C-alpha cells in the first residue's frame, strides 16, 4: 500500500512531467484522451453496478463518469502543486521519479550543461521569464479592455429596452462574418429594422430563431443604434474584470521580479 501511495502521489506526477518534457505538445492531447477514457470507464463501472442493483443505468453512467473525471482533474491539480514544491526545493522530477541517479545533476551543479530544473542555492526561485509572462498578460488585458471601452463610447447615453422580432440571420459576405440578427423593434409608433450582433446576446440563452422575440436596447438619441438588452452592462463588467485581472497580474509581475532581483543580489554577494 505504501508503494502504491508513493507512486500515485509522488512518482506518478513526476513521470507525467518527464513525459511532457519528452513529448512536447503531444501530452495535452494524450491527457484529454486519457481523461475521456477514464470517465467512460468509471461510467461503465457505475452502469454495471446500477444494472446489478436495478437502478437507473443512464444516471449511474453519468454520475460515475463525472466523478471519475473530477478525481482525475483533482490529481492533475495536485501534480501542478507538487511541481511548485519540487521547484522551490530544487529537486528535479527526474530524480524523484527514479529516472536519474543525480550524477548528471551533480555535473550540472559544477557548471556543465543545463539541468532544466532549478538548482537550490544556485538558480533563482522565480525565473525572470515568469515576471515577463505576467507583464505580457497585463499588456494583453489592458489593450483588450481599452479597445472595448473605446467601442462602448458610441453606445453611451440614455437607452430604452423593447421587445423586437427576429426577421432573419445575416452572417456577412459568403457566410464567413460574425452573425447578426436582423430585428424589427418599435420606437414610439414606428417599427424600425436594425441588426444586433449575436455575440452580444446573453450566453445563458440560445440564439433566437426567426419569428422569435428578443429584447433589444436602443439609444434615445439614435434609435437605429441598437443592441441586445444588457449588452452595455456586460461590456462594462468585462472591462472592469479585465482591469482587475491586469492589476493582479501586475502585482504578481512585481513580486516575481522582486524575488528574482533578491536572488540575483544574494548570488553576487
Image: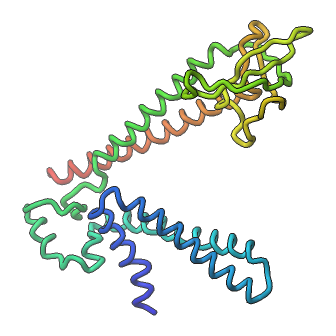
Location of residue 97 by image quarter? bottom left
Q: Is residue 206 above or below residue 223?
A: below
At a point 83% along the width and 22% down the height, the residue shown is: 161
Horizontal relation, residue 71 to residue 92: left or right: right
Horizontal relation, residue 210 to residue 44: left or right: right
Frontmost residue, 243 versus 57: 57
The extreme right residue here reads 189
Horizontal relation, residue 159 to residue 43: left or right: right
Location of residue 169 by image quarter? top right
The extreme bottom residue here reads 1
Tally the marks: 0
Frontmost residue, 54 versus 102: 54
**Where is residue 144 drawn, in percent x and y?**
50, 29
At a point 8% along the width and 65% down the height, the residue shown is: 110
At a point 39% along the width and 82% down the height, the residue shown is: 7
**Where is residue 260 drawn, in percent x and y?**
28, 48
**Where is residue 195 drawn, in percent x and y?**
70, 19
Amino acid at each position: 500500500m505504501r508503494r502504491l501511495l508513493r507512486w500515485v502521489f509522488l512518482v506518478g506526477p513526476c513521470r507525467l512531467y518527464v513525459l511532457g518534457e519528452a513529448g512536447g505538445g503531444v501530452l495535452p492531447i494524450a491527457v484529454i484522451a486519457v481523461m475521456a477514457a477514464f470517465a467512460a470507464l468509471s461510467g461503465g463501472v457505475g452502469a454495471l453496478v446500477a444494472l446489478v442493483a436495478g437502478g437507473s443505468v443512464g444516471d449511474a453512467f453519468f454520475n460515475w463518469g463525472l466523478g471519475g473525471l473530477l478525481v482525475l482533474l483533482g490529481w492533475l491539480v495536485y501534480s501542478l502543486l507538487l511541481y511548485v514544491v519540487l521547484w522551490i526545493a530544487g529537486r528535479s522530477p527526474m530524480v524523484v521519479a527514479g529516472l536519474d541517479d543525480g550524477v548528471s545533476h551533480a555535473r550540472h551543479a559544477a557548471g556543465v550543461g543545463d539541468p532544466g530544473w532549478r538548482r537550490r542555492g544556485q538558480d533563482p526561485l522565480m525565473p525572470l521569464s515568469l515576471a515577463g509572462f505576467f507583464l505580457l498578460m497585463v499588456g494583453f488585458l489592458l489593450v483588450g479592455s481599452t479597445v472595448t471601452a473605446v467601442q462602448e463610447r458610441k453606445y453611451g447615453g440614455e437607452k430604452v429596452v423593447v421587445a423586437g422580432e427576429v426577421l432573419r440571420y445575416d452572417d456577412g459576405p459568403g457566410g464567413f462574418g460574425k452573425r447578426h440578427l436582423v430585428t424589427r423593434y418599435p420606437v414610439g409608433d414606428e417599427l424600425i429594422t436594425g441588426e444586433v450582433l449575436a455575440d452580444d446576446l446573453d450566453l445563458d440563452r440560445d440564439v433566437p430563431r426567426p419569428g422569435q422575440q428578443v429584447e433589444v436596447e436602443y439609444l434615445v438619441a439614435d434609435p437605429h443604434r441598437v443592441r441586445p438588452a444588457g449588452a452595455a452592462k456586460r461590456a462594462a463588467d468585462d472591462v472592469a474584470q479585465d482591469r482587475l485581472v491586469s492589476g493582479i497580474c501586475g502585482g504578481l509581475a512585481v513580486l516575481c521580479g522582486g524575488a528574482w532581483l533578491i536572488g540575483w543580489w544574494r548570488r553576487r554577494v
